[in-house]
Each structure stands twice: as structure tokens, then as C-alpha cells.
Amino acid sequence: MPPTPQTTPALDAILSSIAGADRLLVTAHARPDGDAVGSLIACWMMLQRMGKNADMALRDRVPRIYRSLPCAALVRHWSRVEGDYDAVILLECDGIPRSGLDGMENRFLINIDHHTSGRTFANVNWIDSNACAVAELVYQLIGAAGIDITREMATCLYTAMLSDTGSFSYEGTDAHTFELARNLVRHGADPVQIARDVYFSNPAAKMHLLGAALENLHHDGNLAWLWVSESDMDRTHAAEEDCEGIVNYAIAIAGIEVAVFLRELRNHDVRLSLRSKGRVNVASIAERFGGGGHESASGCTLDGPLPVATERILQYLRSEMEAATAVNGVA
């Protein structure tokens, strides 16, 4: 049975746009995470079952830990969109540049997002920051379309939700989140196997990179930070995707309220992953530097070199944390 449909004007507009399209493309943000990949595939599966001619493409390759997902091998790796698509569905993008794909200007765009930093840039926009993951919105879309959730869809959506809630640990995880997880398991998602695929299938290079990052771990009061240089990446033979989750080791320290992981790029820019235990809104901080995300998990990129970027973000974080302490009275 399909999930119970929950209609909204935006959802109805998306279904109407899909109904009027014969050929569609589904994409998500560059450097895709589990929510992007799982939701992308589930959305594509829905379109297939609706009888649509649909493709799925990403700017960057599917990370290794998500390549066991059903149909992950069918995700195309593009830098530019070519072809006569009637509509393009973008998941978790606050604008076309976030996808990393060229060739989307002047196309009919459908924007589905759950980030607090989401923006209405497309022809049709559905942004719900109360959703635990964009997978939840795709789940609702499938239900509103009257499509049965298959085991493959459930596997993709559960993987997406598991990764984007931090294994059900991030702010906003509630009874509704677990009800959604329950429904996906009832539709065939195997939580044990999915957890093994996501958390116990890491390459050795990621562990070596984690060791390098932990050697650079520092903390001061309730702020922690750690980083890896480009030479660390080369020495450990790590890939970009191996950086995912490293920041969580810093935020896991008792007494730490905000943590940042800095990754030096080849052009000497510095990519940041920010985490908070809830008292500081790191999404607004990331937006200040051209990024975005959730209140407790976000990211952005700063100009290098690494020491300058580190000092810049630490100074800003300390200022924001002092302001939060003044307002909330929390040390």
C-alpha cells in the first residue's frame, strides 16, 4: 500500500508538473550524502512506476558506502545537463549552483528541500524544514502520487533518513521520525543490513584520514575543532567522501557545544563542516559564509590558506557562542 497521502499546495503543484512532463531528470547537490543519494533513487523509482521517462544524475560520484543501494549503479556522473528534459527535480539544493551542474538555466525546475537555508529559486518550490530529511518529503510525494512503496524504495529512503538524522540523534528527531522509520521497515527496509552498509563498510583510507584529523584535534571551553590538510589527504590516499562524519568525533566530546572540521582543498580554499548540540544555530553561521544546512549540522567554504580560515571561523564561532550564552544564560 502507498503511504497515507498528505497534500499541500506545493506538493499538488509538483504532482501536476510531473503529470504534464514526459521526460524528467532527478538530481541533488554536489558531494552527495546519504539523504541525497537515497532520496534521488527513490524519487527516480517513483517516476519509473508512474510511466515517466526519467534519468538521475549527480555532479560527483555516489560515495562508496551508498553504492550497494538498489539502482545506484544507474546514477549518471555529469558536469552538464544535456538533452530535452521537460522538468528537472532538484533535491536539497538552495539554487542551481548547489547541484554543481551546468546547463540547467531556462529549464523547468522543481525544488524539493528541507534545509532551513532553502530558497525558492525554481518554478515550483516545496521547502519544509520540519522534515527530518528530504527522504521524508519524497516519501510523502510517493504517497500523494498513489504509488506503492517497494522494498527497494524503502531501503533507499531508510538509508537516507538514517544518515541525515545522525542515526536518529540530531535535533528534531521525535516520535514522527520513528514512525516513518517503522513504516519503511514494514515495507521491506532491513535496518541491520543498512546499518552495516553505512557504518561498517568504510575503506581503510578513511580510518587513516580520521587518525590524521584526530592528531589535529583541539578544544577550548565548549568549542572543538580539527582539520586535515591536502597533504594528509594525499598521504592517506583518502577521497573527498572519506571526510564525511569526521566532525562528529569533535562534537562527541563531553562539554563541547559547537565543533568544526576543516578540510583544505587543492586550490587552498577550506571546506567546513559545522555541528552543534542545539544551543547555537550553525546554519545561520554557515549562511553568513555562503553555505547553509540545518541548525545543528551545516557547512560552507572559506578562502584559504588553512591557518587563516581556521582563525577566521574560530573567531566568529566564539563571538556567536558568547552571544548565545548572553541570551540563554548557558556557559
Image (tube, rainbow, N blue to C red):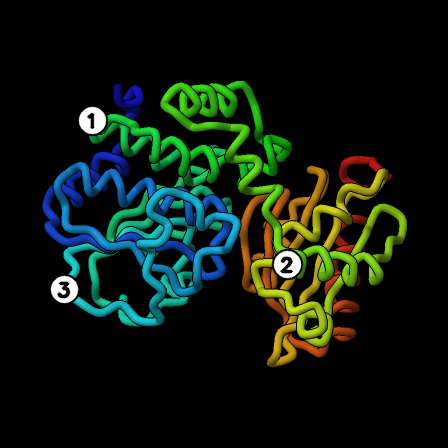
Which of disc 2 and disc 1 is earlier in sequence?
1
Q: Amino acid at mark 3?
A: Asp
Q: Amino acid at mark 1?
A: Gly
Residue at the image point whose x is 82% and y is 42% from the top: 253
Q: How many marks?
A: 3
User: Pointer 2: what residue?
Assistant: 243
Q: On the picture, is 222 further left or further right than 210?
A: right
- Extreme residue in the right direction: 221
Mark 1 crowd level (few <14, some 14–19, many ≥20, 10 Å Cα): some
83, 45: nearer the viewer: 45
Q: Secondary structure at mark 3?
A: loop
Q: CA distance from mark 1 to mark 2?
A: 38 Å
Q: Amino acid at mark 2?
A: Cys
* Circle on res. 84: 3
Which of disc 2 and disc 3 is earlier in sequence?
3
Residue at the image point whose x is 45% and y is 61% from the top: 30
The C terminus - image quarter: top right
Residue 1 position, x and y percent, is 26, 19
Q: Secondary structure at mark 2?
A: helix
Residue at the image point whose x is 77% and y is 36% from the top: 328
Residue 216 position, x and y percent, is 83, 62
Q: Is residue 284 visible?
A: no
Which of the two marks, 3 or 2, is nearer to us in this view?
A: 2
User: Pointer 1: what residue?
Assistant: 146
66, 165: nearer the viewer: 66
